[in-house]
Amino acid sequence: MPLFEYKNLLKYLLIPTLFFPLLLLSACDQPETNAGIAYTIPEQPEQPTGYNPKPGWATSEFAVAAANPLATDAGYQIIRAGGSAIDAAIAVQLVLSLVEPQSSGIGGGAFILAWDGEEIHAYNGRETAPSAADENLFLDENGNPLPYRDAVRSGLSVGVPGTFALLKTAHENHGVLPWEDLFTPAILLAENGFNLGPRLHSLLDSDDALKNDEIARAFYFDEDGNALPAGTNLKNPAYAEILRNVAQDGISAFYQGNVAADIVDRVSSHERPGVISEADIAGYPALDLRTEVMCNDWREYEICGFPPPSSGHIAIMQILGILDELELAEEALVDSIPSAEWLHQFMEASKLAFADRNQYIGDPLFVEAPAGNWQSMLNSDYLADRASLVTDVSMGTAEPGNPGDFYSAYGVQIQQPESGTSHISIVDRDGNAVSMTTTIESGFGSRIMSDGGTGLAGGFLLNNELTDFSLTPTDDDGNPIANRVEPGKRPRSSMSPTLVFERESGEFVASVGSPGGAAIIHYTAKALIGMLDWGLNAQEAIDLPNFANFNGPSVLEEGYFSQTIIEALEAMGHEVDVRALTSGLQAIQRTEDGYFGGADPRREGVVMGD
Ligand code: GLY
């Protein structure tokens, strides 16, 4: 591999390792071939976890940004081999499922936005509830919701995986390289082994449920039940076998036969079994995954995002729209830290957005949009009306509004924990752009692993996406919750894959998104404001401290905000909660010379490109 390809990657890796010997744990420089492309397994220096400053990466022809260097590199090599942005995204996803299994994978689901130079295409690979699931799925024998942790760590939480059907649909529409070639990096890494990263190690170490799964225990833990150390060369023969079959025979090798049977077996033999069936799994590829992108004007930009079942784009655009209706805080940013006055406005706008989200948003195949159109929630008169509720003091908690003068019979869902996920941004040599956010929901999903019926070590993790539904079907007054469980329905999401364009010229401006549960909305909004309003580059915008409000306390990222800011917010009536807010933003911006990419210093992501 030419040195140039690694210049930026090494820069990133060397910064945090300056004071440590650079451990080259494996260096396989010779190209290995699987299908039609040459793929070189990259060197895998051990990386520290925690906060690792990232330089930002300037490229001239294309750029790939993902949450793990091996995944980014797979996308990079695919584009170098002549692949499109979607080809690269497929290779990235298949590697992420191996090296960042806690966040996303073939046992989960994802959303893709794809810009082909003329049109934006939206593909919905969200998991579905099994046909035997109903609104009482998460209620115990007394009709009470299960504790959230118990609901997550169960067969009940597993939705029908959408990732492979999504990748296939995107490839049919935007792929250039043969389908099977895109599997080469992941198969070879699974067969030859990858170096288990520090982040994966520390998450394995701190998880007390995954080792209860016999397949996961044998694969990720030693005989004493200790997480395998960082740097372990981990092979995943079961995953390699599954990928080989899907590469050769298509996605029916996942949705039918041994893999589907094993998913059902693993879920139904859990001590808290789920209700997924082989027919549910076999039925997923027949779904039409195409959906309408939502695009909205903001200043001189058109910001495009994912419609329901995601709440992401609507909430982000409500926040941005409400902020624009307010008299601007005198100083928004002081020494790269948002001011108390600006944070107050952002927190209040977020409360209003989350109040609406919790009442209205659900799978559009089951839930009617307010006034018949989701755009009613972003109507400028409506947002002006909502902004008029923001004063100089905290409103405490916000009530939902009535977009389009629509009065909803739905109850308001209470805020439930959400977490996990991974984000991929890519622009290829032709200027095609992808923004893809992908998930198995919480870290390690349902904590159920399938070897796909191969009988080999390893495999893939099954999602707990169904806990993104409301655990209770009704509110305290008995009104149905829009986001309650129904058979075949997709749970509401916060994932916010976003593409930005110049309104006048239609030129691509940026691709951005993040993991982080419901805080995905705040993280992505922060990055958009940083890049589009405050004139920061993608890396500077990502580096900004995080802040969030889910219609309750105002949450500030630990270690950034002064006591003066905290006290100023408290004086305005905010309950302030200071804690870790671990975003995993990835973004690529178009520049005069090409592209500039940023990756979140809070995680292991990098950007590569020529
Ligand atoms: N499971 C993360 C999300 O969909 O928002």
Image: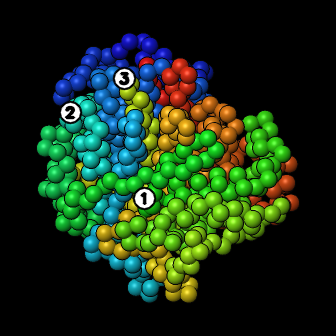
Q: Position of residue 431 (x, y in %)?
A: 41, 29
Give the answer, above or below, for where 302 lies relative to 23: below
**Which tag, 3 or 2, sits closer to the chain's start?**
3
Give the answer, above or below, for where 552 lies relative to 82: below
Is label 2 in a helix, a strand or a loop? Answer: loop
Is label 3 in a helix, a strand or a loop? Answer: loop
Kind of residue at disc 2:
Pro
Between 413 and 533, the residue placed more toward the observer is 533
Give the answer, above or below, for where 257 lies relative to 148: above
Kind of residue at disc 3:
Pro
Q: Quadrant of residue 27?
A: top left
Q: Quadrant of the N terminus?
A: top left
Residue 178: assigned label: 2
Q: Is residue 156 left or right of residue 565?
A: left
Residue 209: assigned label: 1
Residue 42: assigned label: 3
Between 425 and 400, the residue placed more toward the observer is 400
Between 496 and 38, the residue placed more toward the observer is 496
Q: Residue at x 70, y 70 (%)?
A: 397
Please tell me how crowded label 1 is: few (under 14), some (14-19), or many (20+) other residues with Cα within 10 Å: some
Q: Residue furthest front?
A: 504
Please tell me how crowded label 3 is: few (under 14), some (14-19), or many (20+) other residues with Cα within 10 Å: many
Q: How much space separates mark 3 and mark 2, taking CA atoms?
A: 22 Å
**Which tag, 3 or 1, sits closer to the chain's start?**
3
Q: How much space separates mark 2 and mark 1, taking CA atoms?
A: 39 Å
Q: Is residue 39 left or right of residue 146?
A: left
Q: How much space separates mark 3 and mark 1, taking CA atoms?
A: 32 Å
